[in-house]
Amino acid sequence: MAEKNNKVKYNLKNAHYALLTIAEDGEVSFGTPTPVPGSVSISLDANGEPENFYADGIAYYVINNNMGYEGDLELALIPESFRTEVLKEELDDKGVLIENAQVELESFALLFEFDGDQRHIRHVLYNCAASRPGIEGQTNEDTREVQTETLTIKATPLSNGFVKAKTGNTTDATVYNDWYKSVYMPTIAEAEEGDMA
């Protein structure tokens, strides 16, 4: 049977986050992905441009300058779990969320997918930070308009250089089906073998 490849993508959905931990020895680990329902849009621009090194009167060498991605994730409503685990808002004993300027925000992996005409395209950005969302709203007029919330996301490389991964036309079925069970992380050996191919 001939392989069927996607021709188009559409419909952002299935956003998840997984807390990132980097041990003192540099070992990277992730928590179990947690759903972030209500994905509206994502717009992330590549951060960093190639730079030329000039010698002998020419561009002698091109320096790769991949600094990850930066942009916005728009949600219907930021879930309380994200606010407490990533943005480090604290629930007091009365169940009120408190924002404290003295806490450090957590890093996380961001997982999401797009529909395709043949198969969903699943993504993970490994090392993300989110800025606090603004406060915005307006009164109802003749019709009700849903007010969304936006997180500004900055995704930077891990120490091993990994920025992101996404499923392709020939992704292993188990990896594809388990995408939201745990954060997919290739081993260095697998990555090096892929570079040699």
Image (cartoon, helix red, strand yellow):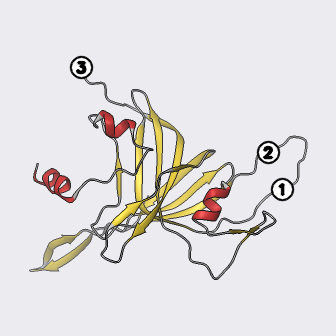
- Residue occupying the point 41% across, 49% down: 182
Residue at disc 2, secondary structure: loop
Sequence-first disc among 3 and 1 = 3
- The residue that mark 1 highlights is 138
Point out the residue furthest to the bottom here: 102
Q: What is the CA distance from the residue labelled 1 to the residue labelled 2?
A: 9 Å
Residue 153 rendering spot, x and y as whole percentages: 52, 63
Point out the residue furthest to the top here: 1
Residue 197 placement, left or right of 113: left
Q: From the viewer's perspective, is residue 29 above or below residue 57?
A: above
Sequence-first disc among 1 and 2 = 1
Residue at disc 1, secondary structure: loop
* Image quadrant assignment for residue 188: bottom left
Point out the residue furthest to the right here: 142
* Image quadrant assignment for residue 101: bottom right
Give the label on residue 2, or none. Answer: 3
Mark 1 nearby-residue class (10 Å; few <14, some 14–19, many ≥20): few
Sequence-first disc among 2 and 3 = 3
Observer-side mark, 3 or 1, equals 3
Give the total of numbered labels. Answer: 3
Mark 2 nearby-residue class (10 Å; few <14, some 14–19, many ≥20): few
The reply to whether callout 1 and callout 2 are in contact (CB within 8 Å) is yes
The reply to whether callout 3 and callout 1 are in contact (CB within 8 Å) is no
Q: What is the CA distance from the residue labelled 2 to the residue labelled 3?
A: 46 Å
Q: Amino acid at mark 3?
A: Ala
Q: Amino acid at mark 2?
A: Glu
- Residue occupying the point 30% across, 76% down: 25
Residue 56 rendering spot, x and y as whole percentages: 9, 80
- Residue occupying the point 36% across, 73% down: 23
Q: What is the CA distance from the residue labelled 3 to the residue labelled 1?
A: 52 Å
- The residue that mark 2 highlights is 145
Observer-side mark, 2 or 3, equals 3
